[in-house]
Image: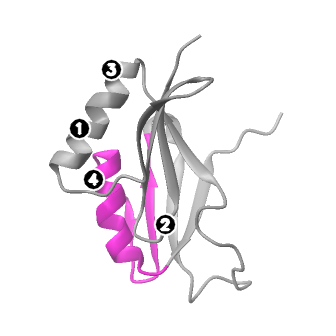
């Protein structure tokens, strides 16, 4: 079985995006350069930010075509995340809403990549 463990986002400004993701993940990157930033998360999952201008082969995708999902334990956790996010003055793409699978809200990074915060309720 193949299990994805590395997520690479093509971004306009890796250093600017690094600040956003350091705040979101509550941790500093393990590698930083003007064109590349790497975060290592719990369980060894890696999230990298690579400058769109230097990606080889050149990128053709648009932000928003996929989502990063972050599962929380309860719907109240989703609401608390949303409240904290707004308190810090950060933009929200979709406020908390109940969906078929559970409670969900969505934020976007500086390039428009979607990040869904959710709690499954079954």
Q: Are marks 1 and 3 in contact (CB under 8 Å)?
A: no
Instruction: From the image, state whether disc 1 or disc 4 is nearer to you.
Output: 1
Which residue corresponds to the image point at 33% horizontal and 49% vertical from the top-left?
A: 24
48 vs 87: above or below:
below
Specify few, some or many for label 3: CA neighbours under 10 Å numbering under 14, 14-19, or 20 or more: few
Q: Which mark is residue 54?
A: none
Question: In the rendering, at what x and y percent does residue 55 appear?
Answer: 63, 82
Question: Which residue sits at x=29%, y=49%?
Answer: 27
Who is closer to the viewer here, 14 or 92?
A: 92
Distance from Cα at disc 1 to Cα at disc 4: 15 Å
**Residue that appears at 80% across and 39% down:** 2
- Label 1 sits on a secondary structure element that is helix
Q: How far across and down, in percent of the image, does residue 32 sit?
A: 37, 71
Residue under label 2: 112
Q: Nearer the viewer, residue 87 or 56?
A: 87
Residue 83 is marked as 1
Check the picture and name the quadrant holding the N terminus. Answer: top right
Left or right relative to 50: residue 96: left
The crowding category of the residue bearing disc 1, from other C-alpha atoms within 10 Å (few below 14, some 14 to 19, many at least 20), is some
Marks 4/3: CA–CA distance:
20 Å
Q: Nearer the viewer, mark 2 or mark 4?
A: 2
Whether residue 19 sits left or right of residue 42 in the image: it is left
Q: Which mark is residue 76?
A: 3
Q: Residues within 10 Å of mark 2 (few under 14, many from 20)?
A: some
- In the rendered image, residue 13, in percent from the top left (x then y), is placed at 41, 80
- The answer to whether the residues at label 1 and label 2 have Cβ atoms under 8 Å apart is no
Q: Secondary structure at mark 3?
A: helix
Sequence-first disc among 1 and 3:
3
Crowd tier of the residue under label 4, counting other residues whose Cα lies within 10 Å: few below 14, some 14–19, many 20 or above? few
Magenta-highlighted residues: 12-41
């Amino acid at each position: 079985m193949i299990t994805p463990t590395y997520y690479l986002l093509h971004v306009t400004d890796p250093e600017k995006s690094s600040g956003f993701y350091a705040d979101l993940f509550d941790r500093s990157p393990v590698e930083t350069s003007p064109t590349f930033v790497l975060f290592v998360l719990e369980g060894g999952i890696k999230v990298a930010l690579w400058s769109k201008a230097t990606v080889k082969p050149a990128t053709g995708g648009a932000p928003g075509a996929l989502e990063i999902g972050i599962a929380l334990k309860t719907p109240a956790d989703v609401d608390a995340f949303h409240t904290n996010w707004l308190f810090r003055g950060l933009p929200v793409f979709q406020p908390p809403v109940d969906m078929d699978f559970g409670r969900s809200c969505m934020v976007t990074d500086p390039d428009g990549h979607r990040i869904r915060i959710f709690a499954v309720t079954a």
